[in-house]
Each structure stands twice: as C-alpha cells, then as structure tokens.
Amino acid sequence: MGAPGINGIVETAVYVDDFARAHAFYGELLGLERVVEGERMWGYNVAPSQMLLVFKRGTCSNDVDSPYGMVPGHSTEGPSHFAFAIARSALIDWRDYLEEKEVEVTSEVRWPQGGISLFFNDPCGNVVELATPGLWPNYQD
C-alpha cells in the first residue's frame, strides 16, 4: 500500500533572535499579515492555507504542554531557508522593490526548467527565496 497522499505544505518555520526586526521584515517589508502573536511564535498568513511560523530562537527546543496537546520541541542551528512562490510577471517588480528597500539580493539563479529565484537574507540571517514557476518539476506555469 502506498502513502495516502499529501495535499501541500501547511506551514514552514524560521527561527529569529528579534521579533521586532523579524516583523519589520516579514510583516512590513514583505507585506505578510501577522495573525498569531505569542511569546514563542508569531504566525504570518502567506497564502490560502499556508503559514510562515516565526519562532523566537532558543525558546522551542523543549516539548510544550498545552490544553490541546503536547507540541514536540524543535529548533535549528544557523540560518534556515525557505522559498515564497511568486508569479513570473512579478519578478522585475520584486527586484525593483528589494533594491528600493535596500535589501541586497545575494544571488539570482536561473534554473534549468525555466524558473528564476531571488535569494536574500532576513535580519536574523535566514535565507529567503522568491521563486517563479519552473523551479521544480511540480511547480510550473
């Protein structure tokens, strides 16, 4: 019997040292709506059914008991990485916007399947990617 199937990625996480700096970046610069604000985690609405979880570094390595159940501990060391999907038609606008906001694009990659990625860092050193369709075989126009 094969796996029952997966419908997508519901959330991805990044770990930061400073919530205020992270919010200035994710909430204000990238325009994501913060929908959860807690002591250990802030959550941002990325797209329908997709969340970016911004965890305060060093606060999540232990299990946490909640009234709803136990949440297993988790953490990362060093910078993490994730990619936001963007339309191919928005690539030039994103390049211009990042330059205007003085966010250094550390790399631009043109993938063999036709996708283009812009890489840059958040204020805590995490590697953020904006990727057009054509990055992966299952992410096409």
Image: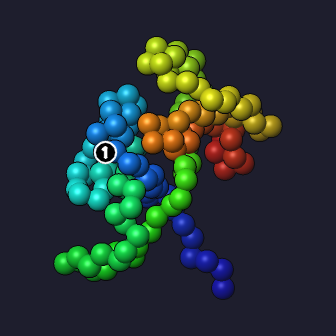
Query: Which residue is rendered at x = 29% and y = 39% of the image?
Result: 20
Q: Vertically, is 76 above or below 138?
A: below
* Residue 27 position by quadrant: top left
- Residue 73, percent from left and from top: 40, 73
Under mark 1, the amino acid is: Phe
Please state if 109 lies on the left or on the right of 66 as rendered.
Answer: right
Colour mapping used in the image: rainbow
The answer to whether any part of residue 94 appears in the image is no
- Residue 78, percent from left and from top: 55, 53
How many dots with numbers? Answer: 1
Question: Quick one: SS at disc 1?
Answer: helix
Query: Which residue is rendered at x = 51% and y = 41% of the image?
Result: 125
- Residue 95, percent from left and from top: 56, 20
The answer to whether any part of residue 98 appears in the image is yes
Which residue is identified by label 1? 19
Give the farthest residue toward the right.
112
